[in-house]
Amino acid sequence: MLKIIYPVPEKVPSNYARFIQIFNTCNSLANLGLKVEICCSFKKGNKKEDLEKFYGINFSPNLSIKSYPVIQVENLFNLKFSSSLIYKIKFVGDLLKEYKNNHAKKLIIYLRYPKLTSLFIFLKRWIDIFIIYEAHEIFSFKNKKLFEIERKLFEISDLIICITNELKNKIIANFETDFQKIHVIPDAVRDDWLNIKPEKEEYIFYAGSLKKWKGVDVLIKAMKYLPGEKLLIAGNGEESNYLQNIVKEENLQDRIKFLGYIPHTEIPKFLSKAKILVLPNVKEDTSVFTSPLKLFEYMAIGKPIVASDIPSLKEILKHEENAYLVKPGDPKALAEGIRKVLSDGKLRNKISLGAKKKVTNYTYSARAQKIKQLIEILIMR
């Protein structure tokens, strides 16, 4: 049986989307018969059963979770500090033991954290391992100091999985990497979410983190042009206070409600009651590469989607086929798009059904099957 080791040098459970994606992807791979081991750090008082409850997943018997120490201190003299040094030392020790016990078979390291690159460059010199890197963005675009780390990472990886074609093309254009080892597999939605039934439509809805590139400020300003409509915003983030101030400035307090953090397991009940689900991303920063979980979760519910017309989203969404696309960063254009979908029942039904049909190709089980196929080709070389 193949074994995949997935290092996660962070504390869990946590509500960040990356952890939702990691645990669902790993569990789906385990359901396909692969042996998968997640190496993470449990928050104090938590154990494997708590992760199952938090993420709403019944873990496969083939999925094991090992806890490693990560030092993390917050609000110490208004500073935050974290260190994964002890994690790395213990992880390397366990990996060497694993390799010694299974020397006839190569181990597969599934990597998502670029800062672990130096560790695996070292390990590759001493032991025979496959490294699969799942890329979600190019970090050196924001911090040039990370260029050398990413260059080495793309070089040593045996297989690179990108979440969008946009990201794949940027990697090929900016790094000397063998394009043949780069494959595109977008993010996904839980298979059971396809069975959620739509309910009475009550409001416009957005779910996700409140960051600048998410364009939630554009959605709030669009509400000025949609009298009588209500907007619910689920999520938190660095832009929270700024966004709430916009609501006050625009005098929209009676029509826009911030729900704050909603557990991921509770999101479906809000999606099912929405009139419109909105992806208002602006064309900058991480939006260039984004394959947001909420895109596929929106599609699974069978409700109409209004989204920004940006290349990364257009890899999945087609205008007036499974979504209504609008000019990014333009509140009036967004409002016009929402109004158009609300007023045109035929269009609303068409894009809802189109999204529901297409998303069957983007479940976690389908994603895991594609990854498994790539792994089987890799180990046969």
Image (cartoon, helix red, strand yellow):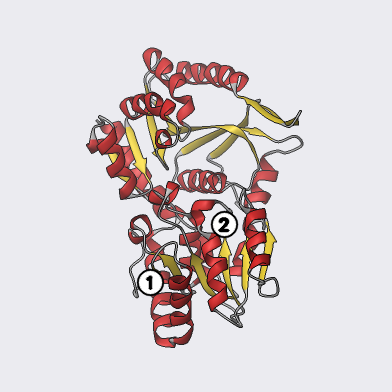
Neighbourhood count class around disc 2 (C-alpha, 10 Å): few under 14, some 14–19, many 20 upward? many
Q: Which residue is at the front of the view, 272 or 210?
A: 210
Q: With 222 as the anchor, is 234 left or right in this view?
A: right
- Which residue is located at x 40 percent, y 12 percent? 126
Q: Earlier in the sequence, mark 1 or mark 2?
A: 2
Q: Quadrant of the N terminus?
A: top left
> Does residue 344 appear in the picture of this structure?
yes
Q: With 325 as the anchor, is 266 left or right in this view?
A: right
Neighbourhood count class around disc 1 (C-alpha, 10 Å): few under 14, some 14–19, many 20 upward? many
Q: Quadrant of the C terminus?
A: top left
> What x and y, as percent, mark residue 172?
26, 37
- Which residue is located at x 60 percent, y 33 percent? 10
For mark 2, what is the residue?
208
> What x and y, as percent, mark residue 86?
62, 19
> Does residue 197 appear in the picture of this structure?
no
Q: With 271 as the anchor, is 316 left or right in this view?
A: left
**Which secondary structure lies at badge 2?**
loop
Q: Quadrant of residue 99?
A: top left
Q: Which residue is at the front of the view, 100 or 247?
A: 247
Q: Are marks 1 and 2 in contact (CB under 8 Å)?
A: no
Could you tell me how far apart the alpha carbons at marks 1 and 2 are, in whole angstroms?
20 Å
Image: 188 above or below 76: below
Residue type indicated by callout 1:
Asn
For mark 1, what is the residue?
322
Residue type indicated by callout 2:
Gly
**Which secondary structure lies at badge 1?**
loop
